Amino acid sequence: MIRKVLSSLFVFLLLFKGHAQNKSFVIHTVAFYNFENCFDTINDPETNDEEWTPTGDQHWNTKKYQQKLENLARVLSEIGTSANPNSPTFIGGAEIENQGVLEDLIRQPKMIDKDYGIIHFDSPDKRGIDVALLYQKKQFQPTSYANIPLYVYKGEQPIKETSKADSQEDLETEDLIQLNTKNYRVYTRDQLLVTGFLNGEEIHIIVNHWPSRSGGEKKTSPFREAAGTLNRKIIDSLQHINPNAKIITMGDLNDSPFNNSVKIALGAKGKIQDVGEFGIYNPFEEMANKGLGTIAFRDSWDIFDQVMVSGSLLQKDYNTFQYWKAGIYNKPFLIQKSGKYKGYPLRHSLTEIGFSDHFPVYIYLIKEKK
């Protein structure tokens, strides 16, 4: 009797496996990459970009600029292709000087056939670096977008304006902090909210680049906690309108998945079973626990770049788009091969045009084909 039951169970499992294998899915890759100092060569009198000009410290000329764009295009076109042959449907980016560099980027040979659209706003950051979203027009139709400012202030006394990094840690999270001497506002990047339809389903995407650790992690933590609080408010407002809103928030947070800005202010959970109603899941917490990273400092890795999803993308009802899995794109060509920073992300130097001091991150969204 037992043998007959086991035999029947075995046949059932074979049939179930065969049925599952016959299913096919639509897959979309959602990526984020800190482009690290993606500047053109033109001096903008409204920002502190003099370093990235032909006469500046970086001797930034047309040849170097074009190589930077070519390098970025190679990375962006390949993210997530191990499971999805198409390049990312969505690319969130940070450290972008202006709309013009994005237009130059999407015209690169490795990008142009994907027909990317651009959503970008100039932010009040005094270095002139912004966030943006690239999207494949044939897959996603935006219906609304807004840049939401982050208002943070430096106590009662202004700190000294910083235009150079004071340590290697500051270099890894470089940011110009400039204060309005009347109200001591710290000028930083806005948070970009984009809403639209992905193959007919409404999706909300928030792109972030939270205030840096320049000046010290502990001292600047309140700025990033404020950024997490603002992110949570944006998500709350979307879920108030539609409790089942599908939301993705991503960016360079300048904090790990365990810092207060992410765990408390935003309220992200590292385990799917802990994500309650209106909750946020952060798949990069588990990766951080394993010692993986997107940025390195003194041979210690951390994950500042993260993509998180609302609980509505965790339902496993593949009749609609759902979260599948996440990853860090850290292929060998993106890694420094020698020298003091061997094993680190291959970034720009005066003698080599690299990629970025960050590795890109990504998630997949999937839906069963009908």
Image (cartoon, rainbow, N blue to C red):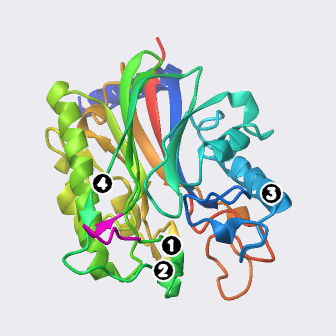
Disc 4 vs disc 2: Cβ atoms closer than 8 Å? no
Give the residue displayed 40% in from the left and 67% down from the top: 254
Disc number placed over residue 150 in the picture, else none: 4
Q: Quadrant of residue 1?
A: top left
> Which residue lies at the image location 45% right of the left edge and 30% below the top edge?
366
- CA distance for labels 3 and 1: 22 Å
As helix, strand or loop, the secondary structure at mark 3 comes to helix
Q: Is residue 258 visible?
A: no
> Which mark lies nearer to you, 4 or 2?
4
Q: Position of residue 235 (x, y in %)?
A: 24, 40
- State the mark number for residue 67: 3
Mark 3 or mark 4, whichever is nearer to me:
4
Camera-nearest residue between 285 and 64: 64
Residue carrying label 1:
174
Residue 274 on image: x %, y % = 17, 50
N-terminal of the two: label 4 or label 2? Answer: 4
Magenta stretch? 178-186
| Magenta stretch prevailing secondary structure | loop
Q: What amino acid type should be assigned to the residue bearing mark 2?
A: Asp
C-alpha distance separating marks 3 and 4: 33 Å
Mark 3 surroundings within 10 Å by alpha-carbon count, few (fewer than 14), some (14 through 19), many (20 or more):
some
Q: According to the image, label 2 marks what residue?
A: 170
**Contact (CB < 8 A) between labels 3 and 1?**
no
Residue 324 within the segment the image draws in magenta:
no
Of callouts 3 and 4, the N-terminal one: 3
Q: Amino acid at mark 3?
A: Gln
Q: Is residue 133 above or below residue 190?
A: above
Question: Please, what secondary structure does the residue beneath circle 4 have?
Answer: loop
| Label located before the other in sequence (3 or 2) | 3
